[in-house]
Amino acid sequence: MNLAVILRGLLAASAVCASLVVLANTDNAEIVERLKPAGEVCMAGDECAAAVVEVAAGPRSGKELYDTKCMVCHAAGVAGAPKFGDSAAWDARVSAKGLDGLFDSAWNGINAMPAKGTCNDCTEDEIKSAIAYMTEG
Ligand code: HEC
């Protein structure tokens, strides 16, 4: 076998490879298309995704806020915080101040309880649901 034959063989082989790559790419595109759910897929940044993001950014539940913000102190009763599930402690506070009074303390802070329980981006309604979750828990 001389060099020219080898080169021709290599060229032929690479041509086959190139067409396989093209085939493979086509197949991928088809597979991606087939894997899409019946509705159109919304990717972050697409116009259709804006509505999804808005929903996700809606009010967080009382449980969600308790788990991420309030639990740090209210689970173990850090610095005298009324504990989650200690209904006697919570009932006493609700009777003394009412839910509105508890909201005022939570919103503005009271003693070792920081304003908004460190949830600085919480809305009034979100703090109220976190309080409802804790007082009922
Ligand atoms: C850094 C610790 C800490 C975090 C975080 C925290 N709390 Fe508190 N919380 C306290 C302490 C301490 C008290 C008791 C204050 C007192 O009566 O002296 C308290 C008391 C309260 C009270 C009762 C207030 C009253 O007037 O009796 C409410 C309601 C409350 N917290 C809500 C929340 C909510 C809602 C969150 C989360 C969004 C939260 N707390 C996060 C420490 C914390």
Image (spheres, helix red, strand yellow):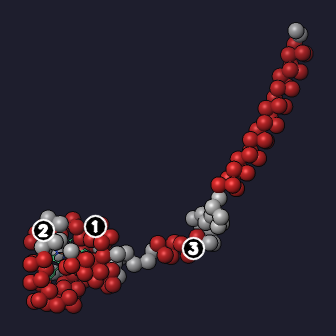
Q: Who is closer to the viewer here, 125 or 31?
A: 31
Contact check, label 2 and label 1, Cβ < 8 Å:
no
Residue 60 placement (x, y as % from top left): 37, 75
Q: Who is closer to the viewer here, 23 or 44?
A: 23
- The image quadrant where one finds the C terminus is bottom left
> Which residue is rendered at x = 13% and y = 80% of the image?
90
In the rendered structure, the answer to whether residue 44 lies left or right of residue 69 reads right
Tag 2: amino acid: Gly
Gap between marks 2 and 3, in whole Å?
A: 40 Å
| Label 2 vs 1, first from the N-terminus | 1
Label 2: few (<14), some or many (≥20) within 10 Å? some
Q: In which quarter of the image is residue 73?
A: bottom left
Q: Say the numbered circle drawn on residue 114.
A: none
In the rendered structure, the answer to whether residue 18 lies left or right of residue 28 reads right
Mark 3 vs mark 1, foreground winner is 1
| Label 2 vs 3, first from the N-terminus | 3
Gap between marks 3 and 1, in whole Å?
A: 27 Å
Furthest-front residue in this view? 38
Q: Say the numbered circle drawn on residue 77.
A: 2
| Label 3 vs 1, first from the N-terminus | 3
Gap between marks 2 and 1, in whole Å?
A: 14 Å
Q: Who is closer to the viewer here, 95 or 12?
A: 95
Residue 112 seen in the figure: no
> Which residue is rendered at x = 73% and y = 51% of the image?
30
SS for dot 2? loop
Contact check, label 2 and label 3, Cβ < 8 Å:
no
Residue designated by label 1: 67
Residue designated by label 3: 50
Residue 2 seen in the figure: yes
Q: Is residue 94 above or below residue 15?
A: below
